[in-house]
Image (cartoon, helix red, strand yellow):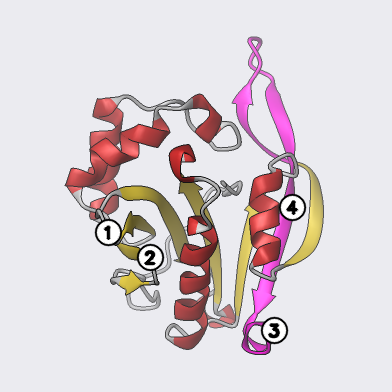
């Protein structure tokens, strides 16, 4: 379950930007900041081609995942999603405020280990992020993007009661042909407003 995530906007100034660097819990999950030690669990799924089919980047080896975990441990855009019972990281979420800050809009994203698909974990984690965004960060709007071919992703967004706001034709590309030509793909845009979330 993986939405297309566009290249992040230029970082908001630290004093203007609200962070998501905290621990959140659900019935079965803990969403926490990344640790450098998460590289092994990260490698479990970022080493699989199917996981990256709709994502930028290529399959990651162990050294790549060590670097990714180190980088994410120093920031607050990504959160590690772990099972409460075992503390195993089964995926990660992305939640970042977009510019301009006064619009109070956050971008949501997620990637999960296929071994844990079909259990509702991504839905549970994203519902908690929406609650955090609207109730604690004061978000006005949360949006997400995904490839129309990724039905599992847009169905998840619709389970979250997010609205499909647009279908953008050939909006971006992550890969090129052997001749270096971009392989363009479409994108769906989904969003939910605080007012809509409060009356769910």
Q: Is 191 one of the magenta-colored residues?
A: yes
- Identify the residue under disc 2: 28
Q: Residue 85: which numbered mark, if any?
A: 1
Say which of marks 4 and 2 sits in front: 2
Say which of marks 3 and 4 sits in front: 3
Q: Count the marks.
A: 4
Q: How far apart are marks 4 and 2 (CA)?
A: 29 Å
The foreground one among 175 and 181 is 175
Q: Do the residues labelled 2 and 3 touch (CB within 8 Å)?
A: no
- Identify the residue under disc 3: 196
Up/down of 134 relative to 61, above or below? below
Q: How far apart are marks 2 and 1 (CA)?
A: 8 Å
Rendered residue at 65%/61% (across/down): 157
Rendered residue at 77%/62% (across/down): 164
- Identify the residue under disc 4: 188
Mark 3 or mark 1, which is nearer the start of the sequence? Answer: 1
Measured as percent of width and height from the top left, residue 141 is found at 61, 77
Q: Hey, which residue is sitting farthest top in the picture?
A: 178
Region of the chain picked out in magenta, as a range: 171-200
The foreground one among 104 and 52 is 52
Q: Do the residues labelled 2 and 1 touch (CB within 8 Å)?
A: yes
Up/down of 12 relative to 185, above or below? below
- Which quadrant of the figure contains the C terminus? bottom right
Badge 2 element: loop
The foreground one among 11 and 31 is 31
Callout 4: 10 Å neighbours few (<14), some, many (20+)?
A: many
């Amino acid at each position: 379950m993986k939405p297309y995530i566009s290249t992040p906007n230029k970082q908001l100034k630290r004093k203007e930007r609200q962070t998501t660097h905290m621990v959140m819990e659900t019935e079965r999950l803990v969403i926490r900041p990344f640790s450098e030690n998460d590289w092994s669990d990260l490698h479990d799924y970022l080493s699989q081609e199917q996981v990256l089919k709709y994502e930028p980047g290529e399959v990651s080896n162990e050294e790549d995942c060590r670097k990714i975990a180190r980088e994410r441990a120093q920031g607050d855009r990504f959160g590690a999603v772990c099972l409460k019972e075992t503390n195993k990281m089964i995926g990660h979420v992305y939640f970042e405020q977009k510019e301009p800050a006064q619009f109070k809009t956050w971008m949501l994203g997620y990637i999960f280990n296929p071994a844990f698909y079909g259990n509702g974990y991504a839905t549970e984690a994203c519902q908690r992020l929406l609650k955090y965004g609207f109730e604690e960060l004061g978000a006005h709007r949360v949006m997400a993007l995904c490839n129309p071919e990724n039905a599992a992703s847009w169905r998840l967004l619709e389970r979250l009661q997010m609205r499909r706001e647009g279908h953008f034709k050939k909006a971006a590309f992550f890969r090129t042909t052997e001749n270096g030509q971009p392989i363009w793909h479409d994108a769906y845009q989904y969003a939910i407003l605080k007012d809509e979330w409060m009356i769910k």
